[in-house]
Image: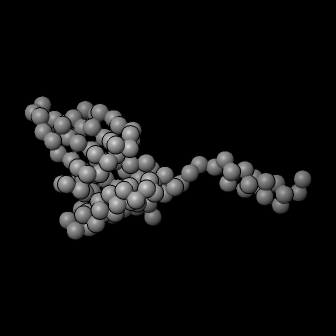
Amino acid sequence: MTRATAFSLGLLIALVFGGRSASAQISIKPDGLMHYSYCISHAKDRASVFLLDRGTLYRCGDEIAVAYFNYLGRQRAPEKRAVEAEGVFIYRMIAGVGKCWNKIEDAQGNPTSIYGCDVYVEL
């Protein structure tokens, strides 16, 4: 087998069996795209855009985050309960690009309900 043939075969195998990129995992349903774009627009409007080393983080909150969090629940997105120094959170993952959360308890153990979403866009 020549090097060119081996390279072509390797490339074909990588394309067929290779992993999906993060952008391929974003829901392409109209509702999913709507919530995604609303969150990014809300983050831009509220100056909640953070430039990181390898991408940009958009953080939305308020009714936009509540709607996105509930949408992810209806879509049966993976959910995780986490106890952290800032309080207790329920996270729902946005496939490949971020997460939405509901903070259900503050650091002192008092019940609360604060929603937010983080969408990470790689460079």
> In the displayed structure, would residue 41 be above or below residue 77?
below
Q: Residue at x 78, y 58 (%)?
A: 8
Residue 78 percent coordinates (x, y): 39, 38
Query: How far from the left and from the top, in percent, is residue 20?
Result: 56, 51
Give the residue displayed 18% in from the left and 37% down from the top.
104
User: Which quadrant is the C terminus positioned in?
Assistant: bottom left
Q: Is residue 54 visible?
A: no
- Left or right? Give the position of 5 relative to 28: right
Q: Position of residue 37 (x, y in %)?
A: 34, 63
The residue lying toward the viewer, choosing from 68 and 15, is: 68
Q: Nearer the viewer, residue 58 or 34?
A: 34
Coordinates of residue 5 in the picture (x, y in percent): 84, 57
The residue sitting at 18% across, 54% down in the picture is: 62
Seen at 68% across and 51% down, the residue is 16
Quadrant position of residue 79: top left
Residue 10 or residue 63, whichever sits in front: 63
Farthest-out residue, right: 1
Q: Closest to the observer: 66 or 11?
A: 66
* Figure coloring: one colour
